[in-house]
Amino acid sequence: MIRTFVAVELDASLRQALAQAQTKLRSQLQRTLGPDVRIQWVKPESVHLTLKFLGDIPEDRVPDVQAALTRAAGGHGRFTVTVEGLGVFPDFRAPRVVWVGMTAQADAVKRLAADVESALGAIGFASEQKPFHPHLTLARIKERSPEVGRAMSAGGLLTPEVKLGEFTVSAVSLMKSDLKPSGPVYTRLCHVPLKEA
C-alpha cells in the first residue's frame, strides 16, 4: 500500500516567496509568543496545492488513477492563479493550520478539483464530504493554538493584502507520501498535463 494524493506542483519562484512569507510570519509570532511555541512549518519544497487526498492505495491502482486524471485534465486548459491572503483552519480562536489562499482563477481550480473528484469517484474512490477550499498550507500549529490565533489576529497577520505571487496550473500529479520523523517526503508517481492554452 502507498499513501497518495492528487496535487498541483508549484514552481521555484513561488516556493521562494512562500519561504520568505514563512520566515516573516515565524519571526512575528516568536516576538509575540516566544521561541518555544510549537508550530510545524511546511518545507517550501513540499508545499503543493492538494486537489484530493486518496490515502492508502494498492500500488497496482496507479495506472487506473493516472487514466482517471487524464480524463479529468483533458477538459481544462492551462491557467494562472494569484496566491494571496493568509488564513487559518478552522478559525482564529483555535487555529490548527495556517494557509495562503488564491484569488484570480480560484474558480478554475475548483472546477479542476471537481472533475478530479468525479473521475476518481467513477473508479471507486469515496467523495470528499467537505467543500473544496483551494489553499497552500504554510504551517500546522501543534500547541497553544488559541494564543497563536490571538497573536495572528492582534498582529494583523490574517490579511487579504498579503500577495505572494502567482503560478501556472499546467498539470496534475499523483504524489506518494512517505511519513518520516523529519516530516513527509513526497514523490511524484505520474504527471498529467492540462491542454495547451
Image (spheres, grey):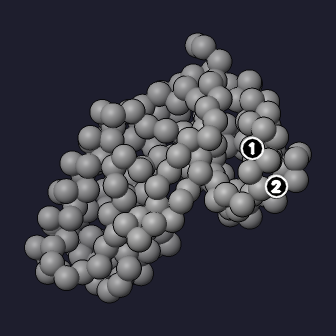
Q: Residue at x 51, y 65 (%)?
A: 179
SS assignment at label 2: loop
Disc on res. 62: 1
Q: Does residue 16 sit above or below 182 in this rendering? A: above
Camera-nearest label, 1 or 2:
1
Q: Position of residue 35 (x, y in %)?
A: 15, 78
Q: Which residue is drawn at 32% across and 63% down?
A: 41
Which corner quadrant holds the C terminus?
top right
Looking at the image, can residue 87 be seen?
A: no
Badge 1: few (under 14), some or many (20 or more) residues near its Cα, within 10 Å?
A: some
| Foreground residue among 82 and 65 | 65
Q: What amino acid type is highlighted by mark number 1?
A: Val
Which corner quadrant holds the N terminus?
bottom right
SS assignment at label 1: helix
Q: Position of residue 122 (x, y in %)?
A: 89, 45
Q: Does residue 75 sit above or below 138 in this rendering? A: above
Q: Which residue is drawn at 88% across and 47% down?
A: 123
Disc on res. 196: none
Q: Does residue 30 sit above or below 157 in this rendering? A: below
Q: Which of marks 1 and 2 is nearer the N terminus?
A: 1
| Foreground residue among 46 and 63 | 63
